[in-house]
Image (cartoon, helix red, strand yellow):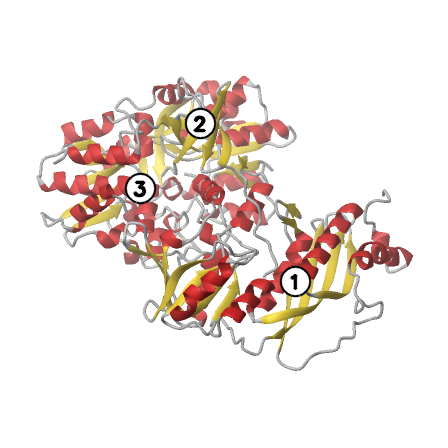
Amino acid sequence: MCVGLSAKVVSVKDGTAVIDASGAKREVSAQLLDELEPGDYVMVHAGVAIAKITQSEDDEAENVMENII
Amino acid sequence: MNENVKAAKDMITGYSGRPLRIMEVCGTHTHEIFRLGIRNLMPKNAEIISGPGCPVCVTPVGFIDEACWLALEKNCTVCTFGDLIRVPGTEMSLAGARAKGAKVRPVYSPLDAVELAKQNPGENVVFLAVGFETTTPSACLAAETAKSEGLKNFSLLTANKTMPNAYKALVGSADAFIYPGHVNAITGNKTCIELCEKYGVSGVVAGFTANELLTAIAVTLTLADKGKPFFRNCYPRVVKDEGNPAAIRIMERVMQPCDSEWRGLGVIPMSGMELRDEFADFDARKKYDMPEIKGKPNPACRCGDVLQGKCKPCDCKVFGTGCTPQHPVGACMVSGEGACSAYYQYS
Amino acid sequence: MSENTVTLAHGAGGKQTSELIEKVFKAHFSNPEFTADDAAVLNMEEGRLAFTTDGFIVSPFEFNGGNIGKLSICGTVNDLACMGAKPLYMTCAFVIEEGFSLDKLEEIAAAMEKTAKEAGVKIVAGDTKVAGKGQVDKVFITTTGIGRIMDKAHTSGKFAKPGDAIIVTGDVGRHGCTILLARDEFGIEADVSSDCAPLWGTVESMFEAVDDIHVIRDATRGGVGTVLYEIAEQSNVGITLDRESIPVDDGVRGVCGMLGLEPLYLACEGRLVIFAPESEAEKIVETLKKGKYSQNAAIIGKVTEDNKGKVIMETEIGSKTVLPQPGGELLPRIC
């Protein structure tokens, strides 16, 4: 239901962040996340950063798998 | 293919436990599952079915009629996410309205629609607010921004939906749910944990990459085979148990729950969101004094059954003949996320 | 109306029309065959000729990597090149909106001449019409071209055969992505420029290197995905692609990620899709990689006996799926 884009925060100012997804840049709202800093990775949906991404995909998969076996 | 992907894939293809039906309830999951060819990997005794998770697909005919009315009768500039443009209304889609001279503009974000209104004070801009908990905060941000800037030419036509009561309506349709990762990124996992503990409904929260989806499916098969209800968050790098508190707060400030019609499913009590009275000036239905518009869906279309997993797209009489992605009858054929469209395109 | 814009008088056929032709078109399209008469007189060589026409409307008319003038030459040159034809002569017809900048018109004409020169083709006749304000969107161009087909060239969309390798001459979808960004409807910025290029040299180099090429198509509207479906149908074969070997520019990937678009459906204006026997494929790619416009050439798939009319994608997780057939308006998928 919701195409999310994982992107790197380039800059943050007044509740707006510039994000970069493999070279494509756009301004998005940063109002829903506290303490966003350049270099953070975020999940973006419909022009709004909705979540901070806290670990890599591979680490996540490894942890998730370890927990069921 | 990295190690994780390979391990998860082997677990899926090697599954030999009891027969399972897994329902994904997110259109982007539907789309990615087809795009990656995951269905072709599924073992004989485990099936993936698609639930009602594409906002375009669950948006009722009447909503399109309302949008066309605003565009044609009130000369509003209708801003919308792209896929909604081709969804059939009773008489026409928004693309049809555009051909009659209506101003219909695809936008990436509701906030872009606010910007458009700011820059064009002579135009009455209406944003079509569809979507689930992931998307609703962006519409709320748009309403708050418009209010704080005192915009007089911006409003929302809302059809926002929420998942909890839809899950309850779907209990029994599948052995386990694959929960929509980006909805849970906002709402947190409370509802899913409750479904597991109170109703014995199993499920996992999944991300959207190949790695994340395969991992989530592998986890589901492994745990479902054991027969005990379970809940696992397989997308912890984005989804926290508490969700996004700021997003939840803005939804509560700007909107309130209401009954809502789902295409094919009918009205599900308290499964929608509407603007609070404080935002009445930004509610297109009130602002333009809209009469009650009731849409008439095509009776042959079985989107409702498809959305509930009661039939496959190919079981519908008009599928692939009267209803194709080029000429959709039901909404499920419109969006690339729609179950019928995905089924038509990829199989 | 200021002197620096095109007026209805420029299209009326009188003195001002002559001035426009002298000042803008003759000044740029200078070659002995450019005619002042009703039709150009050409000396033709013997052999098979290829003859084609194409209309160009693009909004905006200028974009990163080119303008409508360059596009209008490339489009027709590339159509000829796909038939193995060396482009010889072209004509061009303009429909210009009243009030269009004369300076911009000159820029367009200059780009046309530069591109034509590079492709070795001569512009020998033209026509100009001026339409009232709002009747056309700035400027529309139609070009027609004629070329001589190389003796060894026998290409057609009908000639794809099971076992053929499928090659693209570079990364896909850049022109479409550039135009999308140039329209600035979605607030996205990316360093992407159009792949718009005249490809006769590219085709010539391939025919110098190998003898047997079955199909050459330029992937324009609808992108590489559309071309593949067309060929699968015309030749009544199946196509299997390898997702990971399809070259996509990073910026294009980022933009597509944001808008939920598939790069294979975005237009190219300087990319060829080539079907040739597998035994020749490596040699073709090697040759292409030395070329100015095809350094990122890659083998992306093969032709199969089964799955007739379909394009199957081998996905990054080692499974298979059908590439959806592109159709209708390309709309961003957001929610």
Residue visible at 37% across and 44% down in the picture:
B57
- Disc 1, disc 2: CB below 8 Å? no
Q: Is residue B25 above or below residue B341?
A: above
Q: Secondary structure at mark 3?
A: loop
Which kind of residue does numbered mark 2 sit on?
A: Val
For the residue marked with disc 1, what is the amino acid?
Answer: Ala
Identify the residue under disc 1: C119
Q: Which mark is residue B220?
A: none
Of circles 3 and 2, which is in front? 2
Is the C-beta separation of discs 1 and 3 under 8 Å? no
Horizontal and vertical percent position of residue C7: 83, 49
Q: Quadrant of the C terminus of chain B?
A: bottom left
Residue nearest the observer in this picture, B287 or B172: B172
Between residue A27 and residue C207, name the one nearer to us: C207
- Is residue C207 toward the left or the right of residue C147 in the image? left
Q: Residue at x 68, y 65 (%)?
A: C120
Q: Position of residue B346 (x, y in %)?
A: 34, 56
Chain hosting mark 1: C
Kindly state the secondary structure of the residue where label 2 is placed. strand
The chain identifier of the residue carrying mark 3 reads: B
Rounded to the nearest angstrom, the CA distance separating label 1 from label 2 is: 44 Å
The quarter of the displayed image where residue B60 is located: top left
> Where is mark 3, residue-wise?
B52
Q: B205 or B87: nearer the eye?
A: B205
Name of the residue lying farthest toward the right = C15
Q: In the image, is residue C149 above or below residue C228?
A: below
Query: Which residue has dot 2 on it?
Result: A9
Marks 1 and 3 share the same chain: no
